[in-house]
Image (cartoon, grey):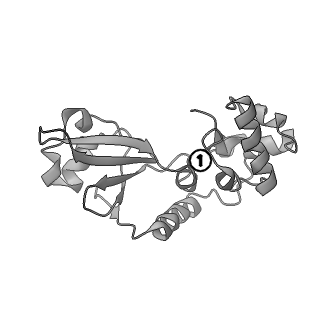
Amino acid sequence: MQLRGVRPGGPFLLFLIGAILFLLHGELGADGDEGVGVAPQDWVLVRIAETEPTFYSFPAGQVLGELAERAFPRLSARLAAGCRDLKLEAGTEIFLGAAEASGEQGCLVAPLPERSRYLMGIPLNVNRSGVEDLEMLAGIGPSLAERIVAVRMRNGPFSAAEDLTSVPGISRSLVEKIKGRICFSM
């Protein structure tokens, strides 16, 4: 397998890459049927001090050490053991930096912003999404997105798609339409 890296030059390029992945993945125009679920693309964003952040694709089950050996061999040898064994998850951002005094490279892993993850084909997390993120869902406009956020703030996180029917203006048919494109984990 050949390693592919893409260097974003700014927010626009990051958005463009996500949009391309979204379109290539066939999500556009899907009806949201239960069986139409889309598997996430296996992409991570790696940030290393003093270099441009880079997207990398990887096969399922790969660990960070394997990616590091191919993508940045000079750094790979200094990668901390805990980082080497870190299983890569699609839609995450990995920060690599020097660990305290040891000279080893430590790592910090965080999910990419919800908008980026959704454009990569990963379901939108309703409990972490802002108004603008929620507006990407079919049938959700600005006022409905604001109501979702308000109900979440007032009542706490949603635990299932059916909980969205407690938001004024959300019908069961709308929930069925977006069900395959949303998730609720914290």
Q: Position of residue 134 (x, y in %)?
A: 69, 51
Depth check, front residue: 57 or 165: 165
Foreground residue, 71 or 38? 71
Residue 72 occupies quadrant: bottom left
Question: Residue placed at 76% from the left, 49% from the top?
Answer: 146
On the question of residue 141 being in view, the answer is no
Relative to residue 14, is residue 131 drawn left or right?
right
Residue pointed to by mark 1: 38
- Which quadrant of the figure contains the C terminus? top right
Q: Residue at x 77, y 37 (%)?
A: 151
Visible residue check, residue 158: yes
Name the quadrant containing residue 164.
top right
Q: Residue at x 33, y 41 (%)?
A: 108
Using residue 29 as the reference point, say whether residue 76 is left or right of it. left
- Residue 59 position in % (x across, y down): 36, 46
Percent coordinates x, y for residue 40 in the rendering: 52, 47
The quarter of the picture where the N terminus appears is bottom left
Q: Quadrant of residue 138?
A: bottom right
- How far across and down, in percent of the image, does residue 11 sit? 48, 66
Task: Give the residue type that dot 1 points to.
Answer: Val
